[in-house]
Image: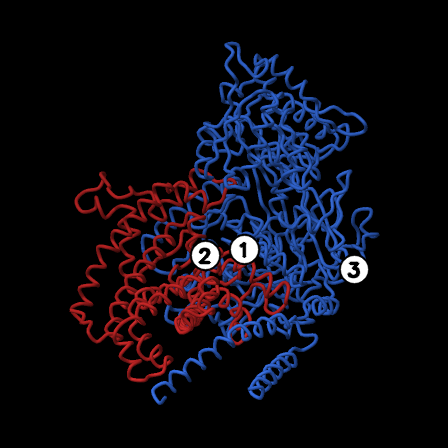
Chain colours: A blue, B red
Amino acid sequence: MSEPKSEWRARLALVLVMIGLTVPASAAWNNPYPEAERTANILYAAFNERPKHLDPARSYSENEYAFIAQVYEPPFQYHYLRRPYALVPLTATAVPRPIYLDKSNRRLPPTAPAGAIAYSIYEIKLRPGIRYQPHPAFARDERGQPLFQSLDAATVRRFNTIADFPRQGTRELVAADYIYQIKRLAHPALHSPILGVMADHIVGFKDYARTLAAAWRKLAAAGADGAYLDLTRFPLAGVEEVDRYTFRVKIHGKYPQFLYWMAMPFFAPMPPEADRFFSQPGMAQKNLTLDWYPVGTGPYMLTVNNPNRQMVLERNPNFHGELYPADGEPGDAVAGLLKDAGQPLPFIDRVVFSLEKENIPYWTKFLQGYYDRSAVPNESFDQAVRVGGSGDTEVSDEMKARGISLLTSVQTSTFYLGFNMLDSVVGGYGERARKLRQAISIAIDMEEQIAIFRNGRGIAAQGPLPPGIFGYKEGQAGVNPYVYDWANGRAERKPIEAAQRLLAEAGYANGQDATGRPLLLYFDTAATGPEQKARLDWLRKQLQKLNVQLVVRATDYNRFQEKMRKGDAQLFEWGWNADYPDPENFLFLLYGPNKKVGGEGENAANYDNPEFDRLFERMRNMDNGPERQRVIDQMVDIARRDAPWAWGLHPMQFSLQHAWVSNVKPNNIANNTLKYMRIDPQRRAVAREAWNRPVVWPIAAVMALLVAGVMPAVVSYRRRELRSQRQPNG
Amino acid sequence: MLAYLIRRLLYAVPILLGVNLLTFALFFFVNSPDDMARIQLGVKRVTPEAIAQWKAERGYDKPLVYNDKAAGLQRVTDTIFYRHSLRLFAFDFGRSDEGRDIGYDIRQRMWPSLAIALPTFLVGVLAYVTFALILAFFRGMYLDTVGVVVCVILMSVSALFYVIGGQYLASKLLHLVPISGYGGGVDAFKFIVLPVVIGVVSGIGGNTRLYRTFFLEEIGKDYVRTARAKGLSEARVLFRHVLKNALIPILTGVVVVIPLLFIGSLIMESFFGIPGLGSYTIDAINSQDFAIVRAMVFLGSVLYIVGLILTDFSYTLVDPRVRLS
């Protein structure tokens, strides 16, 4: 019996040795990328939500800009390193100064008062020689005729992606492409989110939208597949092609923020050939649309477009060339951000974005070196970041050991708790309601909320303006005196007694009204789910400090929005991300004519103070300077006193990056920042291999255990079978 | 048999119509066309004009099921339900509310779903039947007792735990496979192996116990005793006789899910980054894309009906006594 046993053991040992031999010492089995990319100059990133639109006329969210901002080039961009944020030319030769005209189109001096200015003209000159990425829309045959502009549905059926088209072409960027894109903003089928804004500003835009709508209806009535509305046949009064490389945009009045709009992808050039190409019959059935396949002049082009799995940006071989900035903020040189000054962009050849819906695989892959940069997921915060006693933050020892560094920045956003000014209890402009709102503003301890629920990632707001926006004031000068005291060199929230005093003055002594009934308030929010419950409980407790009862009415976002539109909410929470770095983009959230109720605007608190509105109308047309700062100070003070918001917080962005990533500086306004980043692929490859050596012995051990567990039963069965075979003979 | 098939297909029509109506009612009970427009157009700077135009373009400006302003048959046909739901019967899924062709998306996304679901299904059925046979084979021995206890433990663990635990063990700790991702061709293997193993392991407990019960029930029958009396080995009795006769209850649960393999699995595909159909419906519900929701519910219902018909046909293959008429 000992012979077969030893034979079996020898076989098992041989199998284990063979498994061991098949494991290469350095190969990383868990590498999700092809081995050929081991030392390639590729940046690996993730996205957690599939983009909805990649058409620059429609796209209006951060997760979409992450892709299209690398492909499309508006005339201007934000300087990568300078703060405060500053516009610099991108495809334009310069950031233009507006030409002001009066009602009779006579030129006015640059110092003309805003009231006298009837029109502003922006003349944009483009740099010649800029070429589009290779694309079949530009492909031409030997005779110069377009190759893929008159396809029928049967031919289109042969192509599944843009890469399937056998020929590609390019052409030079011209002013007409920018004009074409501005016209597209009025296209009725595109539903551009800024149609309403531009209709208020660009001369003739409202009528133009009506003209296009009528033409489109006519075209749609024909019902043909591949309907194409040729916008070149419809002139727009407010835009003019001066020459091949120059165009003008004429807007109503003085509106300095218009330049910021022109730094957004909405104003990126669109070649009419591309629009026509994607409008051909059969294209939409293959999801070959301009909404999914960007065509631009930028440093990258989208070569793989599978929003359910992977999006890949590759270096545009026709990129016009741009140099890394040579100047920045003080401290940028020390931080190594100017080492590449004057070097041609982009530094990275490919950027691979993978869809990661869940935090666990995303975070694990970052730690394994398979993502180069990462946000800090809430559940991994303690693993990644150490918060000091004074609130300072640094990476944990585990991260340090891997060479991971942390970048933090305050976002140009605000999350606020608002009061509905139309409400009979918390709304209104009398002393009673004002003191009630101020008391609540003091009682809700935003610093505590930031510490408990955001891991310290945010700063308590002192007003509507976040840091980084002109008008924001640091230190004592920027403190909200109705909620904070300046003490010990920092802003300290007023004691709860101050809030109780204000509440009593408002007629709610000890949280009760004149009849002795407790004050009951309602809080509407779209925050639902177990993770939000703790925060909402915390909020209830904040008002309990004043003996005020808070009823939380959590609902889905649709119902919440409906309540806000109808003015049915009492207290609510909402937020705003900056479109552009101008105080107008935040202060308009409190501008009376912009009320949610009746106006469908963004003023969710329905705040309507004539003095604030008067100052806003003055401020919005002013250039940045001491005078504008004075007006902003007055506005902020009015708003703080009236307290239509409890002022909430400005979130902080924490991001981690591996040691092989450089040239990263947080920029909350610009989206086209991939071109500045640099990686060291060799260093990454070494780290990945060191961190991901496969460990196979536990598998072999488990298999051995299983075999050992089953063997006695097999032996026992064999004995039983042998017995049963012997019995008939016996 | 053909008459049976035609009859079953005709039965399917009112079922599908009912499913369609129910989906429509539930969806529009929760969402209004205005809500849908706002979600699609974004939350910033949306004007009432843009909402009205969006609805008009997609026919969501019509009444839901009855148009009292229209005349004649148009009272029924000029409604959201008629315009959007009935063409599904021609398998014309149309476009999603964000503008993508739904049929194209389904055709693209079903293959990754199938790449995970099919091997999980095949390996799973094979493993469950094998384990159940082994337990039945060693019935009454310690291996059977230990096996049942292990099955009960495995049944008690949540599917999510298998996913997270499997990812932690296989990818984070042992570095054997990528924790998530998907690739084409040969590359697909390293991405598929972990979800397939997890899918199989997570089903072992329940299925093995169930199949073991089927086998033990058969083992006690007279024909098994006869087979043993003829001198057949225990292995031959189990694999040739017991397995074949226990197949009908197994097929009842197995064949019906075959067509549904195309639909994929939400948890698996989310955690493993598989670009399949698993999350298509959930994403559509979140983005209030009625076009996708109705198409996927319709497709799911069709596939389920197909699964039931296939199950009936499979009975005739394993049991000659069964006739479809």
Q: Which amino acid does label 3 sit on?
A: Asp
Looking at this view, is A262 or A432 the one in front?
A432
x 83%, y 52%: residue: A333
Q: In which quarter of the image is residue A429?
A: top right
Which one is in front, B1 or B41?
A: B1
- Mark 2 and mark 1: span between their CA atoms? 10 Å
Are the residues under marks 1 and 3 on the same chain?
A: yes
Q: Distance between the residues labelled 2 and 3?
A: 43 Å
Q: Position of residue B65 (x, y in %)?
A: 26, 44
Labels 2, 3: front one: 2
Q: Residue at x 53, y 13 (%)?
A: A513
Q: Is residue A406 left or right of residue B22?
A: right
Question: Callout 2: residue from which chain?
Answer: B
Q: Give the residue type that dot 1 points to.
A: Lys
Q: Which chain carries label 1?
A: A
- Contact (CB < 8 A) between labels 1 and 3? no
Q: How far apart are marks 1 and 3 (CA)?
A: 35 Å
- Nearest to the eye among marks 1 and 3: give it: 1
Q: Which of marks 1 and 3 is nearer the N terminus?
A: 3
Chain letter for mark 3, please. Answer: A
Name the residue nearer the viewer: B186 or A340.
B186
The residue beneath circle 2 is: B279
User: In the rendered view, does A313 fall on the left or right side of A397?
Assistant: left
User: Please, is residue A452 above or below residue A421 in the view?
Assistant: below
Image label count: 3
Residue ranking furthest to the front: A730
The kind of secondary structure element at disc 3 is loop
| Kind of residue at disc 2 | Ser
| Quadrant location, the N terminus of chain B | bottom left
User: Residue A340: which disc?
Assistant: 3
